[in-house]
Amino acid sequence: MYRTKTCGELRLTDAGSEVTLAGWVQRTRKMGGMTFVDLRDRYGITQLVFDESADAALCEQANRMGREWCIQVTGKVCERQSKNSKMPTGDIEILAKQLNVLSESLTPPFTIEDNTDGGDDIRMKYRYLDLRRAVVRKNLELRHRMTILIRNFLDNQNFIEVETPILIGSTPEGARDFVVPSRMNPGQFYALPQSPQTLKQLLMVSGFDRYFQIAKCFRDEDLRADRQPEFTQIDCEMSFADQEDVLQIFEDLARHLFKEIRGVEIPKMQRMTWHDAMRRFGSDKPDLRFGMEFVEMMDVLKGTGSFSVFNEAEYIGGIVVPGCADYTRKQLDQLTEFVKRPQVGAKGLVYVKYNADGTVKSSIDKFYTPEVWAQLKEKTGAKDGDLVLILSGDNANKTRVQLCTLRLEMGDRLGLRDKNKFECLWIVDFPLFEWSDEEQRLMATHHPFTLPNPDDIPLLDEHPERVRAVAYDFVCNGIEVGGGSLRIHDGKLQEKMFQILGFTPEKAMAQFGFLINAFKYGAPPHAGLAFGLDRFVSIMAGLDSIRDCIAFPKNNSGRDVMLDAPGELDAKQLEELNLSIDLRQE
């Protein structure tokens, strides 16, 4: 037996017992004739004591050990004279009687500590060492606990877990596919699933009623802090269900997770239409942990002064930043430079200070009378001591998005985006279609199988851009955690959708014939939803990036620097796959 106890479980009540521990050397300290070793495993740290007066050879053996050596120690549990209240095992220590070195270690490239000296790149290259750090391990333990809670909750709701295939056909509608060449079918390719969307719909046709899967998904898209080329979804589908059924079950699931993981009671979640979210916050995933809701100012500022930028604008909007009228010129200039960055794209920023002494100061004072500033104060609800920040533009939606970025920046600067506070809501009534500048056509906002709002179906022929979808997103703290929709189960309506999206009947049958044909055999009304597990775990853990809750993540270039992947194939492999060497070199 390699160990009788773990390094995290011994307490003062175990004093006098003999135990065997196994783990890694965190650090060693020699003090006089004593050598102290902190031994670490997944469960915690226990102090070992090697006494030179009791066993000089054993103590000398301990002195030769370096950091991260893997060892086995047998000894007696004793009460520590100088206790460490910061450690659960800080009341005891092990007086070592026997030491067995299981494996020596090179000096690690960074310290295996919570506050390590290793940067992101080096830690990702040696991820197997990074995972030994308690702060990283706890994220994966949290992920494990969440998946257990999810499975148990959905099982109690009569959902059945079904695995769907990883090698499927390509469906170009959506993000780019990762493709896999088929050796046995020359010139043909599998795709890795962006989601199990069509497969779970087929399960509904099959009569499985309620399905779920902790599903691996793959998208070949540009990466951000909340994106990885491979990620995990809590993927679900329900038959004979409407929007209310789906939202109720998965709101209950989210509330259950927050209570069990964070001890937080989430109240009944509000529902906000996509249109209202864009109008009030410039985002379809608004962060409601703080205020600064948009105020539209066209009626106050357009045509009431000689400032041509406002007089020619199609949208003027702003936010009230409480208590920031004392911002210096330097701070305001920094905000101006922030909104003018290419990532934001605004041409400038206007400010109005309603000073604590009742005076008003603006960057465009000379263009407006004091009466206009008084009207603006009433319009915005600003108080003395508040700062009003204003953006304008010739495209309302674009300017709102820019204002959203400014709002989030102010929330960060003022410390209002508390990671221990959770504000969740549903966004509903999304547009069914969105215009793609790249494709120069309407694209499905979610996917081609989303049900149009029945009230809007008459608009499909003449004004498809005005049609709402029966779709919903779950948003928490400004992050889209998941979403879903009711699905089309009527074959004629599905044909109409394909037609609007520019599919010929032949193209639709070539790509989705399996689903079209399945719907001819009594398809039930069905709906579904998928939560991003990585994002959900990162919110629970208070992380800024989903990479920290994935065991072996990719970097921002989509590379696995530990495995050095992706990599080139040798000529023989390419030949077997019927791929030319020229293709590799282009």
Image (spheres, rainbow, N blue to C red):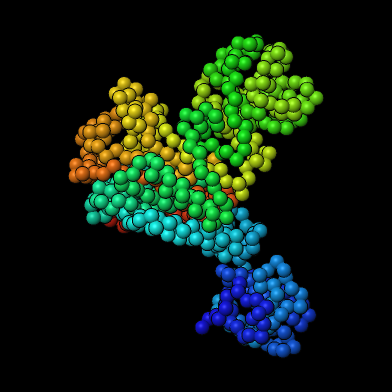
The answer to which quarter of the image holds residue 21 is: bottom right
Q: Is residue 361 left or right of residue 275?
A: right
> Camera-side residue: 321 or 249?
249
Q: Is residue 67 visible?
A: no
Q: Residue at x 50, y 29 (%)?
A: 276
**Where does residue 163 sit, x and y in percent of width and height?**
33, 57
The answer to which quarter of the image holds residue 164 is: bottom left
> Camera-side residue: 14 or 402?
14
Q: Residue at x 55, y 62 (%)?
A: 137
Q: Residue furthest right?
A: 357
Which image quarter holds the C terminus? top left
Q: Is residue 88 visible?
A: yes
Q: Is residue 455 left or right of residue 425?
A: left
**Where does residue 542 sit, x and y in percent of width and height?**
58, 51
**Where does residue 476 sit, x and y in percent of width and height?**
53, 43
Q: Residue at x 63, y 71 (%)?
A: 45
**Where does residue 316 sit, x and y in percent of width and height?**
58, 20
Above or below, comparing residue 368 to residue 115 in the picture: above
Q: Residue furthest bottom?
A: 54
> Camera-side residue: 179 or 318?
318
Q: Residue at x 55, y 81 (%)?
A: 4
Above or below, comparing residue 550 to residue 69 in the picture: above
